[in-house]
Image: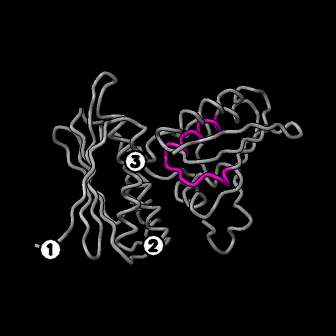
Amino acid sequence: MQHYDYIEIKIPAKAQYVGVARLMISGIASRLGFTYDDIEDLKIASSEAITNAVQHAYSEEEDGEVVVGCALYEERLEIMIADHGTSFDFEETKKHIGPYSDTSDARFLREGGLGLYLMETLMDEVKFHHEEGVTVFMTKYLGRERGEEDVKRTANS
Amino acid sequence: MNLQVELLEQNSVQYFKVVGEIDAFTAPVLRERLAAVEDVQGLKAELDLSEVDYMDSTGLGVFVGFYKAVSANGGHVKITGLNKRLNRLFEITGLNDIIDIEQKESEDNNATL
């Protein structure tokens, strides 16, 4: 098996700690040598996943936790974000992801659903696992350019 | 991890200067500040994001909501001072075709952040 270093943080499922986990991701990405733009992509994608977990996994009264684990490989960073609460309806949410189109009437603009789209656009791979909560696995490779073509392909798929 | 929202009125334009990070924690603050003016008929609003150093979909959601409310009341929203990163977010989400946005002048060639 390929060697990797592993770093994990467990945060209370509260919005004020999303930024704390984001700082950790930023530090790790910087240590691995990602470019400035890639680090920003990683910060946004992981914040989207953590925000989903914080906002949807637990009810108001529950004191839940979100685990963010990072596997540092030589040529890639794998991030796992897991909650153990009731999962949000991923399939339903997935139907609504995608970019806005300029033909959309202002009245029908969605205010949510962009988070998943951004995760899939900004990372090289995103996978979801559903079992006692939701786990998101995201991968970004070092030195891989994601040009306009990639963005378009993701948008149309 | 903080957000400040300043409101100035200039020649009947409601000018908001947003400073800091917009995420799940701070977005409600921004939403509340904007909601206070969004029902004004024919509102002209400018949101200056030149000092926003982080934003994700929670921020985009707030701007979409504000844009919808202001448009419904016959007003106009302009978002200004976007750095390359923020501009890219508006581009990949297609919001740049819907909302009136303007890039930071110094961002034409190189990222200053």
Q: CA distance from mark 3 to mark 2?
A: 21 Å
Amino acid of disc 2? Thr
Q: Chain of mark 2?
A: A
Q: Residue visible at 16% across and 73% down? A: A3
> Which residue is denoted by mark 3 in the rendering?
A20
Q: Is residue A83 left or right of residue B55?
A: left
Which comes sooner in the sequence, label 3 or label 2? 3
Which comes sooner in the sequence, label 3 or label 1? 1
Which quadrant, please, contains the C terminus of chain A?
bottom left
The image's colouring method is: one colour
Amino acid of disc 1? Gln
> Which residue is denoted by mark 1 in the rendering?
A2
Q: Chain of mark 1?
A: A
Give the structural element (helix, strand or loop) at label 1: loop
Q: Predominant secondary structure in magenta? A: helix
Q: CA distance from mark 1 to mark 2?
A: 23 Å
Which comes sooner in the sequence, label 1 or label 2? 1
Q: In the image, is residue B59 part of the stretch drawn in magenta?
A: yes
Which residues are the magenta region? B49-68
Res B67 → quadrant: top right
Question: How many discs mark residues in the rendered view?
Answer: 3
Q: Are marks 3 and 2 on the same chain?
A: yes
Q: Is residue A2 left or right of residue A127?
A: left
> Which residue is denoted by mark 2 in the rendering?
A35
Which quadrant, please, contains the N terminus of chain A?
bottom left
Q: Chain of mark 3?
A: A
Q: Nearer the viewer, residue A54 or B96?
A: A54
Amino acid of disc 3? Val
